[in-house]
Amino acid sequence: MASQKKIACIGAGYVGGPTMAVIAQKCPQCTVTVVDINQKRINVWNSDTLPFYEPGLDDIVNTVRGKNLFFSTEVEKAIIENDIIFIAVNTPTKDYGVGKNMAADLQHWETIARQIRNVARSNKIIIEKSTLPVKTAEAMEIILNTGSQFHFEVMSNPEFLAEGTAVNNLLSPDRVLIGSRETESGQKARNELVEIYKSWVPLEKIITTNTFSAELTKLVSNAFLAQRVSSINAVSAICEATGADVDEVSKAVGADSRIGAKFLKASVGFGGSCFRKDILNLVYICRMYHLHEIATYFENIINMNSFQQQRFVDNIVQSMFNTVAGRKICMLGCAFKACTDDVRDSPALSVATTLIAEKANLVISDPKAMTNMKAALGDLKNVEFIDDPYQAAKKCHAIVIITEWDVYATLDYKKLFDRMVKPAYLFDGRNMVNRKTCYDIGFNVYSIGKEPLIH
Ligand code: NAD
Ligand code: UDX
């Protein structure tokens, strides 16, 4: 069991909140304070609802909040009072200046580095939880230690949780990665962090590396995962052209134990706050080191993903006689994946904006993500939000499935069909409906990587 430790985390988002809740639960002798400049977000963490939907998280938060897990906006107090400080602030793609649309925007991280240096009154261990460019820890050490009377040991401990399964990922991680220096203070800091994690993670799953390797591993892991999705999506286009079936190909390819079955599900394209951003970050780093061929190699993962999303929406317009103007289209699912309410970089956004630009009237339904989707689309005209899929599909010409919510596999498609304008179209961006049944009901069925079934 980890000895008594005082831990703070700056950034109470999708990563900071859940990771700290699990540390607090597994290390009851530690006190964990999560701080954020967003007062609204902290208020929600301190209320009966959580800031986002994450299965199982409320149970954990309810057992520890107010005991050894605290949420607050007092960032400086947390810096002063705690010895170990995780940084889990957002590191989005830069949308201005040098590296625009490629590099990670490090302004929040930089602000915090300076704030820590200015207010700290003792030595600290600083842990990068955010995903950052390689060598950020080194830059942070320079900012923190230059001219300071205290010592700041910076380590990299990237987070690999996936949204929708975050609790399980945190409770039973495939690995915990800790990057640190091999100096005496680096080893001491690493041991402190290992001691926390070994309260519930088997030692053989705690991988220790140098700091740069840990930072790079995070970017590369996301690139490898996204690359598999882009590869199978590339194959889906070949399947549609040739009559092969992408699910059959995926199953047979994934049966090779060297390849494995996971992350080979063809789709409308990957989304989420991480894949695109982290690959762009990796591409930018490659370019900085003049590794242009490597940059192009990784960049194509994103190009393929954009192509897949465009191909999907082009197919909708072309199949419906090259115009959707004035026609009602029902979008089932807008979260970037099932079991989350997150719509960041969701394929739903690009599909919705293209269909609206084509003058379609869009009706969006999702079990959890409607509020975030409304905020993301802003004041776009011609969009309605209706919870009940059967109401949403009323008088629509087409249903477009974007998110793989289980409920969409078991809807009564006959009931949906009966409420729609004919001919009725079904565009399944997740290959989750029973194609034959839907075709027999009367739908024209378009799947990813399969021959369409058209009446
Ligand atoms: P998020 O946007 O949900 O949360 C970040 C929080 O940091 C926000 O609440 C913001 O208000 C706060 N913040 C920003 N500047 C601050 C400051 N100066 N002081 C205090 N708080 C500040 O982001 P997230 O999804 O939790 O991601 C955080 C990091 O973790 C990113 O680098 C991301 O790439 C990485 N990551 C995310 C995931 C994921 O699934 N979301 C998984 C692994 C890694
Ligand atoms: C990802 C990484 O998995 C996680 O390790 C990292 O910490 C953060 O980024 P996340 O973005 O939350 O997690 O979800 P993930 O399950 O990886 O899915 C990403 C996207 O790929 C989703 O849009 C998903 O629907 C899509 N996807 C995934 C597919 O289209 N096909 C697949 O086979 C797998």
Image: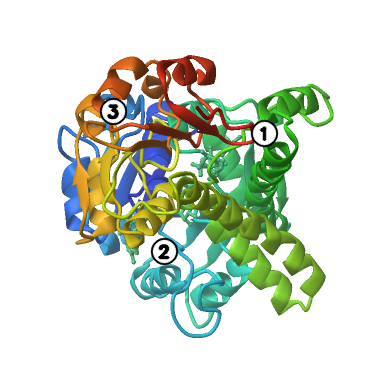
Mark 1–mark 2 Cα distance, whole angstroms, equals 49 Å
Mark 3–mark 2 Cα distance, whole angstroms, equals 34 Å
Counting residues from the start of the chain, the first of labels 3 and 1 encountered is 3
**Tag 1: amino acid:** Leu
Q: Give the residue pinned by disc 3.
A: 58
Q: Is the C-beta separation of discs 3 and 1 under 8 Å?
A: no
**Tag 3: amino acid:** Asp
**Tag 2: amino acid:** Ser
The response on whether ligand 2 sits within 8 Å of label 1 is yes
Q: Is the C-beta separation of discs 1 and 2 under 8 Å?
A: no
Counting residues from the start of the chain, the first of labels 1 and 2 encountered is 2
Residue 431 occupies which quadrant of the picture?
top right
- Label 1 packing within 10 angstroms: few (<14), some (14-19), many (20+): many
161 sits to left or right of 399: right
57 sits to left or right of 317: left
Q: Where residue 60 sits: x, y (%)? A: 33, 26
Does the rendering let one see residue 110?
Answer: yes
422 sits to left or right of 242: left
Mark 3–mark 1 Cα distance, whole angstroms, equals 31 Å
Q: Is the C-beta separation of discs 3 and 2 under 8 Å?
A: no
The residue drawn where x is 52% and y is 21% is 435
Does the rendering let one see residue 30?
Answer: no
Q: Which of labels 3 and 1 is toward the front?
A: 1
- Label 2 packing within 10 angstroms: few (<14), some (14-19), many (20+): some
Q: Considering only vertical position in the picture, is 413 above or below 129?
A: above
Please count the marks in the image: 3
Q: Give the residue pinned by disc 1.
A: 264
Q: Where residue 441 sits: x, y (%)? A: 41, 16
Q: Considering only vertical position in the picture, is 299 above or below 352?
A: below
The residue drawn where x is 37% and y is 67% is 120
Q: Give the residue pinned by disc 2.
A: 122
